[in-house]
Every structure is written in C-alpha cells, then in structure tokens.
Amino acid sequence: MKATIAVSGKGGTGKTTISAIIIRELIARSAKAVLAVDADPNACLALTLGVDTYGTVSSLREDAKTKDPTNAGIDRLTSFEYGLQQVLTEAKGFDLVTMGQPEGPSCYCAANNLLRKYLDKLCDQYDFVVLDNEAGMEHLSRRTTNNIDLLLIIAEPTPIGQVTAKRIYGLTRSLPITIKQTGVIWNKAETTIDVDGIKNFGSVPFDQNLVDMMMQSKSVLDIAADSPAIAAVRQILNMTLTE
C-alpha cells in the first residue's frame, strides 16, 4: 500500500517525536525508503531522527523567485529540481526534505508552483510519505502537497489541548486539499478525550525512554521496539492504515 501521512499540533505537544516514531514504524513496513518532510519552521525532525540536513527548501525558493538559472540551457523547473535533490538527506530507510521558514511578504507563486510539481513528483516515488507540520499547517494551506491519506492532530489531554485540536480540525476543513481520514492522537495520556466532531485515533502514554533519548541526544530509531510510546504508535498505525 501507499500512504501520505500529515502530522500537526502546536509546539511542545510531542508532534515531531511522534512523527519520527511513525517514520521508524513505516521503515519496517516498506521495501522502499520512507520520505520524511519537515514542514515545521522550527525544524527538529532531522535531530530526532539522528541525521544532519544539507539545506532547506526555503533557501532554494528564494533563489528560484528572483534568479534565472546560470546555465541558459536548463529551464527553471529543472534547475529547481536539481537544487532540491541537493538538499535531500538520504539515510538508512528514509530520505528527508527540510522545508525551512515559511513565505515572506513577497510573491512566491512561481516558486511554489515549482515546489508543488516537484513534491508531487517526488512523493510518487515513495510508498510512504510523512509530513511533520506546524499547527497552522502553512505548507498544506499553500497546497505544496494536494492529497493526504491520514491527518493526525497531536494534542495533550488538557483544556488547552482540546481547544487547539478543535482549531486545527477547523482549519483542515477549509484547506483546498483532499484528506481521507482526520483524527486526534492524545500524547502523554493513558486514555483518549472526546471532542465533538473529531475522531479519536488513540493515545500515547508518557514514556521515560523518550525523555532519556532527548537527554542523551539519541535518535528515536535507537529506542527499543517494546517501548510504550513505540508500541502505542504502532497500534494506531495498524488501526488507521488500511489496504
């Protein structure tokens, strides 16, 4: 099967860590590499996965917006694709694209069209794509990708977490893209919380292994397979990913 999974949530909810766990689990399911897209301006996915990045898409977008290719024989799209290939981080079991900062006040329409074409082409090469988004989902709202199979809203089991989940869910309903499934994952929680109109996908318990990982600058890929958070995310994926 093939699936594009988008993960959203406000800062501090554990969104990026859960994104990394999802990538870890999908690596075990796929014969091909998993494509990871860090679409959060506060880019931390590479660190959580234990890799270094070679650059960001935002820097290339700035160049594509203002400059023509240095080689007159190469069109703008080909030049932009070449640059994006250079910032694609290749690792064991996954490839990573880091988006970088969102758009500034200038017009990025042409650059975004190039980016959307490239990402659509790139995503077609992978069975699984995981997008780690900010709460506002800037890159989704700008339609830098068009179809999402699974949108996971990460929230903590607090009143603020419930309000944030509602706001993100409301935003998803206004986006000009197709989303097949949307639901909440309650992080650092033993049970789920019912929020009107939003499906519960499950809960991920507090896991000391994740705390130790961050304190020791280790990767999510180094955590034992039976760690509570890993097992919980695996169960959620088993439930939500269908043939």
Image (tube, rainbow, N blue to C red):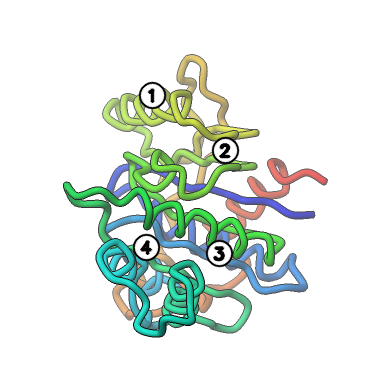
Distance from disc 1 to disc 3, alpha carbons, whole Å, reads 30 Å
Secondary element under disc 2, as helix, strand or loop, is strand
Residue position marked by numbered label 3 in the rendering: 227
* Residue nearest the observer in this picture, 205 or 16: 16
Identify residue type, mark 1.
Lys
Which of discs 4 and 2 lies nearer the camera? The answer is 4
Q: Which residue is mark 2?
A: 202
Does the residue at mark 1 contact the one at mark 3 (Cβ under 8 Å)?
Answer: no
Quadrant of residue 162 within the rendered picture? top left
Query: In terms of sequence position, does the residue under pointer 1 or pointer 2 come before the other?
Result: 1
Give left or right: position of 93 versus 100: right
Mark 4 vs mark 1, CA separation in Å: 26 Å
Nearer to us: label 1 or label 3: 1
Q: Measuring 46% from the left and 38% from the top, which residue is drawn there?
A: 153
Q: Earlier in the sequence, mark 4 or mark 3?
A: 4
Task: Verify CB contact (< 8 Å) between mark 4 and mark 1.
Answer: no
Q: Which residue is mark 1?
A: 166
**Residue 51's spot in the image, x, y percent?**
42, 81
Q: Which residue is mark 4?
A: 99
Residue 208 spot, x, y in % from top left: 40, 63
- Mark 4, secondary structure of its residue: loop
